[in-house]
Amino acid sequence: MGRVEEDIQFDWNNIPRTVTVSSFYMDETEVKNVDYREYLYWISRVFIDYPEVYKKALPDTLVWRRKLAYNEPMVEYYFRHPAYGEYPVVGVNWLQANDYCAWRTDRVNEMMLIEKGILLPDPNQAGDQNFNTEAYLAHQYEGAVGVEMEDLDPNKDFRKVRMEDGILLPKYRLPTEAEWEYASLALVGTSVDERVYQRRIYPWNGDGLRNPSAADRGKIMTNSVRARGDMMGVAGALNDNADITAPVHSYWPNDFGLYCMAGNVNEWVLDVYRPLTSQNVDEFRPFRGNVFETLVRDEEGNIAQKDSLGRLRYREVTEEESIDRRNYLQADNINYLDGDKSSSIVYDDEDASLERGSKRMYNTGKEKTDPRMTSLVSDHTRVYKGGSWRDRTYWLGAGTRRFLDETLSQDDLGFRCAMIRVGGSRGN
C-alpha cells in the first residue's frame, strides 16, 4: 500500500510498503440516503423519549452551502427527496458513521434470530428495550421469545443463543485504511499466481480515467473534476454524467465488485491520522486508533445494567489491569510511537500531561502561547480516502490520504461498512 505516483504536495505521509490484511467483507457501494433515512426512522420510533438521539444522528445538510454558489436546492432536497434515495449520504461525520455501523449490526442480528424463529418480531420496542446484540448475549434483553434453544445442561431446560452457536454475525464497522486501500486496488484482477503484473494507481488498470474496453471505449470511469470548472462535461457529451454525486451503482465496479472506490464521494476509514503511520504500524492488520476497553461491572463482578438506550457500558482498561501484560500497558495507544512522550518535542518536560488530548505533539491548535503547540492533527483526527465529485484526478489514487476532525462533515464525504471474515485460511 502507499502512493504509487508522484507526491506533488510533498506530504511524505504514505511511503509505499507491503502489509497483510486478513479476509473481510465490504459493502459494494457507499451507504445511501435511503439507508440512512431508514436508520433515522428507527431512531425516531424507538427513542421517542430521547429526541436528542435523533438530533445527534441527523446529517448536516448545510454542508452544501458555499459563499459564492447557489446550493440551496441541495440543502433542501438532497437527503430527503426520493429522487436522491440511491445517492450516497453525505454530511455524516465519523462518529455518526460509527453509530450507524453499530445500529446495523443489531438490526441484522435481530433479523437473523427472527428468521430462525428464536425471537418474534417486536414492533413495539422502545427506549432501552430495543434489541442490542451485546445486551442479548449478556442476558439483558428478553424480547418476544419464539422457539427456545434446548440447553444440554441437565439442570436447565432452555437457553439463549450464544456466540458459539454461529448464528450471530460479527460487527459492522468502518474499514481500516489498509483494508480500504486493498479493496480499492483489487489487485486480484492484475495477478497471476503470486505475480502482480500491473501495479495500479486507481481501482482499474492504466493511468487514465477513460474506459479502454471496446464496448465503452473513451467513457469516463469515475465521477470527479476533469478540469477547472468542468464538473460533468458539455451539453450533449457529458463526460461523467454527474454534476454532484451519482447513484451508488454508477460506473464500473472494480475486480472485487465494488463501486465508486475512486470518485463520487470520499469515504471515512477507521484510522486516526498520523503523518508517520506508514513507518510505525504493524505489518499485519495495520491500524492506528486503539483505545482498549472493558465492560463496566459491579462489585460482585457482574456486568452492569444497560444504559438508557439499551447498550452495555464500557470503560477504558486501567494501567493496574494491564500491569502484567506484555502486548500493551495502557488503554489509549493512539499516540504510541507518534505523539507519546518518547516521540514528543517536549519529551524532556516531566510536567507535561500524558493524558489523551494533552498538549504534546498533536493537539487542536488552541494553545497560542507556544508556537510548538499548534497542529490540525489531534487524537480525534480521522483519515478519509477515495476522492470525490469535487476532486481532481490526483486524489483518486487509492494511496492518497487526507484527514478531518471526527466531528466534522463535508458534502463530498460518505462511508461504507466492512466486517471481518471470521476463521483463518486453510493453508496449503
Image (spheres, rainbow, N blue to C red):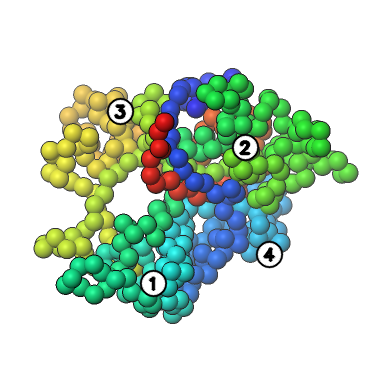
Disc 2 marks which amino acid?
Asp
Task: Return the disc, 3 or 2, that comes first in the chain's sequence.
Answer: 2
**Mark 2 lies on residue:** 255
Residue 375 position in % (x across, y down): 41, 33
Marks 4 and 2: CB-CB under 8 Å?
Answer: no
- Whole-Å distance between the Cαs marked 4 and 2? 30 Å
Residue 125 position in % (x across, y down): 41, 76
Q: Is residue 3 left or right of residue 222?
A: left
Q: Is residue 61 visible?
A: yes
Tell me what residue is drawn at x 52 percent, y 66 percent. 40
| Residue toward you, 29 or 61 | 29
Disc 1 marks which amino acid?
Ile
- Whole-Å distance between the Cαs marked 1 and 3? 48 Å
Task: Return the disc, 4 or 3, that comes first in the chain's sequence.
Answer: 4
**Mark 3 lies on residue:** 337
Label 1 crowd (10 A; few <14 / some 14-19 / many >=20): some
Q: Is residue 399 left or right of residue 407?
A: right
Tell me what residue is drawn at x 22 percent, y 35 percent. 327
Q: Is residue 103 visible?
A: no
- Whole-Å distance between the Cαs marked 4 and 3? 48 Å
In front: mark 3 or mark 2? 2
Q: Secondary structure at mark 2?
A: loop
- Whole-Å distance between the Cαs marked 1 and 4? 35 Å
Q: Secondary structure at mark 4?
A: helix
Marks 4 and 3: CB-CB under 8 Å?
Answer: no
Q: Is residue 88 above or below residue 278?
A: below
In front: mark 4 or mark 2? 2
Identify the image quadrant of residue 266.
top right
Q: How many marks?
A: 4
- Which disc, if any, is residue 99? none
Label 2 crowd (10 A; few <14 / some 14-19 / many >=20): some
In front: mark 1 or mark 2? 1
